[in-house]
Image: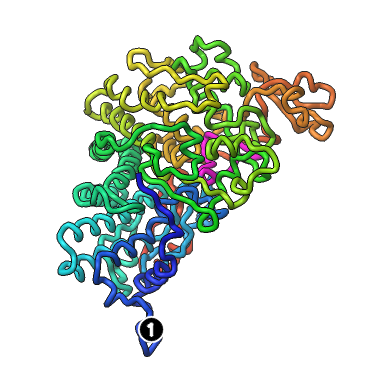
Amino acid sequence: MKTINIMKQTVGALALLSVIFLSASCSDDLLDRQQQNALDDETYWTQESNLRLFATEFYPQFFVGYNTSWTMDYTFRGYMFSDDVVYAGPQDLFEVSVLDALGSGNNTASTSGAPTAPAWRGNQWAGPTWYFGWIRKANLMENRIETRMQSILTPEQSNHWTAVARFFKALDYCRLVSVFGDVPHFEKEFTSAEKDIMYKDRTPRGEVMDKVYDDFKYVMSNMRTADGSQTLNKYIAAAFISRWMLFEGTWQKYHNNDNTRAQKYLEFAVEASDFLMSSAKYAIDADFHTLFGSENLATNKECILYRHYENGLVMHCIASYNQVYIDEGQPRAANLDLVKAFICNDGEVYQNSSVANAGEFDIANLVQTRDPRFEASFLDRPTVKAAALLFTDKFIDRAGANATPPIPTKYTATNNVTDAPVIRYGEILLNWVEAKAELATVGGSAVTQGDIDKSINVLRDRPLDAEATGKGVVKTAPMSLTALPDDPARDADVSALIWEIRRERRMELFMEPARLLDIKRWKKINYMKGTVKPDILKGIWVNLPVEMPDLVAASKVGLTKVEKADGTVVTFDGTNAADMVGFYLPENVQDRNDYTDRVYLSPIGKNQIDLYKSQGYTLKQTTGWE
């Protein structure tokens, strides 16, 4: 496994590199005399170590981990827009107007300065803004290797660093395409005088992703398998290729009915995953709280890449949001639909399980009857700190989760120093088996029991810590292809196997960068409608007068509500506390406004279209947002 510690990078030099190389042609005559300590594009490309420094600036943009300080883009707190969570009042709305679009930034990929555009498009898109500065940086790096360093680098060095540049370009395009669909594809570096390139219209999605495919193939053929501590290598690249080729393969299948492209990308997802699985470098060797709450993941074999944090140097806030006594709380919290998706520990859905009390939805019974990932993800008692009373404590160690006031400083505010898995082997196993199952629907070989044993059943055999076993948690029975659950909730257009693989992803990857992107690529965005899935608007089963007396206090008259098993809603009126037993309904909970399929992709901000128009060019709006 590899680590990244961003604070140990030469931040000042990186900032200077951005200014020089991304704005090199903006102004050649601002100063009459060259600064003696300045880095210059004409003299910089003289040794391999300079390439390493130049590439390092990509790391905090693409290997975010738990981010830093209060910034929560691409973190647990950033992935709270999906059918997994609910909160009090009206649910988060999808964007309804082009004027709301946050597609600001350097949409022309010109030389207008260092990359400063917001990286995060917003929760509902789980990706970047309309910004191509990182694409330009990658193209510039590739150009300098080709034009200025061929006599300096060995062929192996040249190929490796070209692979690094092409990897980050492809990775950024994967994220851009996931948000916007068609985007301009910039193959090479260009100057501000080349306006036909600078203001080119959107390239069709399929063409962009075919270019990404080619870049990733080059990476797998040329990137080093090892390049020192804290550095991108072929294994790390393969993990991201596994993720994004699965994403695009299933998107092409379910949205475009393009089985040719679907097969091409899915086969690559399997290939990249196979590379990792056959390496014997990785394993599922720790429980969730150790994986997500350790201060040093150096020996964890599940982490293909992690980000390291150090007190006083680089810290984050994610653990503080998983500590129940800290004020941050969880206004968006796990809902009943997610809870019902957790398999029982006999491998059956709750409707068909032989486990005692499998049909009970209070936390105490859920802990003992469900897959261990339930207990590992949630506090074992209801709390008003979570909108639906089920509090996520997945991203903190056991000591932090169990701490009572006064809470140690390292779990508070932005003082968190737990390491963050950036991409992990558990996801790769799920990518691999899903890609194989999807390939079987477009002409590939059928998934075998051996495939299940190498993937899902490895995850089900994850170690349990002493606290879990002390609560009566047991590992879930292995999945058997000959005895898949007969889930009455399964969509009619999804096979039992693919349905169960999707369930496994939901349990394993809760609040990681998965669920919203998953339901989008599967063309299942309607899961976020309460009219389609009423349980997304509900919480767990509670006995309020016993477990949560504050919710049946005088101040809660007319506000606290529960839903009985038969669907009857009971509102607290000040006299009926004893009857307030049922599925908790968050205060004033309301379904989100209706939406159409256009929300699969983001609109572009009007300012982007106007900029093109001012230069005599046309930039098309995203389909459905015209």
In this rendering, does residue 210 appear at all? no
Q: Is residue 334 magenta?
A: no
Check the picture and name the quadrant holding the N terminus: top left
Instruction: Give me the residue at 30% from left, 72% from top.
Output: 191
Q: Position of residue 533 (x, y in %)?
A: 54, 28
**Residue bounds of the magenta highlight:** 76-93
Residue 131 at what x, y percent from top left? 41, 60
Coloring basis for residues = rainbow
Task: Tell me the residue at 39%/87% (across/down).
Answer: 31
Residue at (34, 64) in percent of width and height: 53
Vertical relation: 358 (above or below) 590: above
- Number of numbered discs: 1
Residue 164 horizontal/vertical position (percent): 28, 56
**Label 1 element class:** loop
Place of residue 137 in the rendered image (x, y in percent of width and height, measured from the top left) = 33, 64
Count neighbours of disc 1 (C-alpha within 10 A) and say few if under 14, some if 14 to 19, many if 20 or more. Answer: few
Give the camera-side residue of 415 and 244.
415
Please state which amino acid type lies under the numbered disc 1.
Answer: Gln
Foreground residue, 345 or 183?
A: 345
Determine which quarter of the picture holds residue 549: top right
The answer to whether 58 appears left or right of 417 in the picture is left
In the image, residue 113 above or below residue 218: below
Determine which residue is flagged by label 1: 35
> Residue drawn 42% across and 69% down?
15
Main SS category, magenta section:
loop
Residue 382 in view:
yes
Q: Is residue 85 magenta?
A: yes
